[in-house]
Image: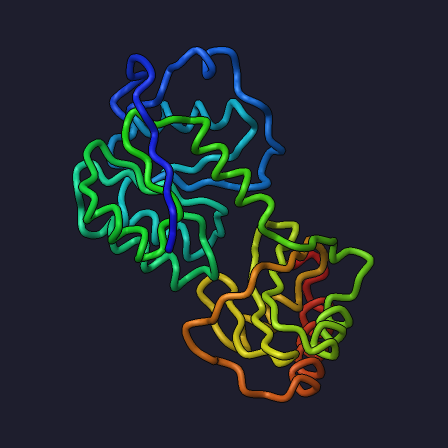
Amino acid sequence: MKSTRHAKAKGPVADRLGVDSSASLKKGLPRMVRNNVPILLVHADQASARSLADSLEQTGLSVFIARDGSHAMSILEFRAFGVLVIDIDPPVDERADLIGWSLRLCPRPRIVVVGSSIPREQEHAVLNRGAGLVLRKPVDIQLLLDFIRRARTRSSFTGTVEGVDILEYLQFVMLSGKTTIVEVTSTLGTDGRIFLMNGQVVHAECGVLRGVQALYRCLCFREGTFAHLPWCEPEQTTINVPGELLLLEAARKRDEAWGGSPGLD
């Protein structure tokens, strides 16, 4: 059963979003490595959203703001985020649907739901749909930062693609028979995920691409970083091609892409 933690009001509300302005916040928050966990904040009130974003950015985080669920979906199709913070005041169906939609698009997004008055039944519903944390206003920034820190540490391994042939690395993972998700991020910020079950590639995602096209896109990145993510089942199996054939075709496509556009990621 999933657990959650709730913020308690500790002082005056900083703005309409309800940012906790307690003494510990005024003393300054610990710095984080910039861009490690980009955050997408979904809130209809842009002034309130900006106030929370400012508080998070003071710790070194990168925060993007979406005005509503539809805007957030259009952003998520082309950019990955480590954490989604969804404000449900006032309640809007599309923002609730955003939880399920983002889970379909990304393997394991970290989702925080914020609201002024969230009934217990609604809290259980959003947790069951995939949210990792429910915060009631005023928002306790420290609780939110603790959640973000945990998101930073859930990857079991990271490395760089530069100096390592990603095709050879994927072949190594396949031969090892591992069940894992390899996340690859290019230096231009494009990222994708390759799902391997018992050493077989069963699914890949890269932006709006799915299946073999997404796999080939990931394997054509010239430079970037990669990480192993905790395993979760993809919604569907989109790749049923033997691994050696996938690697051969990926190598051919990469030669074509790099030959014509040496700087393309």
Image quarter of the N terminus = bottom left
Q: Residue furthest front?
A: 1
Count of residue discs:
0
Q: Position of residue 181 (x, y in %)?
A: 59, 65
Q: Position of residue 247 (x, y in %)?
A: 69, 80
Which one is in front, 188 or 17? 17
- Where residue 252 sits, quadrant-wise, is bottom right
- Which residue is at 69% across, 78% downward? 177
Q: Residue furthest right?
A: 163
Residue 120 position in % (x across, y down): 21, 44
Q: Quadrant of the C terminus?
A: bottom right
State the residue at coordinates (42%, 26%). Answer: 141
| x 66%, y 67%: residue | 220
Q: Is residue 147 left or right of residue 49?
A: right
- Residue 156 found in image quarter: bottom right
Q: Does 116 sit above or below residue 263?
A: above
Across and down, in percent, residue 206 comes to 52, 64
Quick check: 172 above or below 39?
Answer: below
Residue at screen point 54% across, 42% down = 150
Q: Is residue 165 left or right of residue 147?
A: right
Q: Do we see residue 41 in this rendering?
A: yes
Asked whether residue 66 appears in the rendered view, the answer is: no
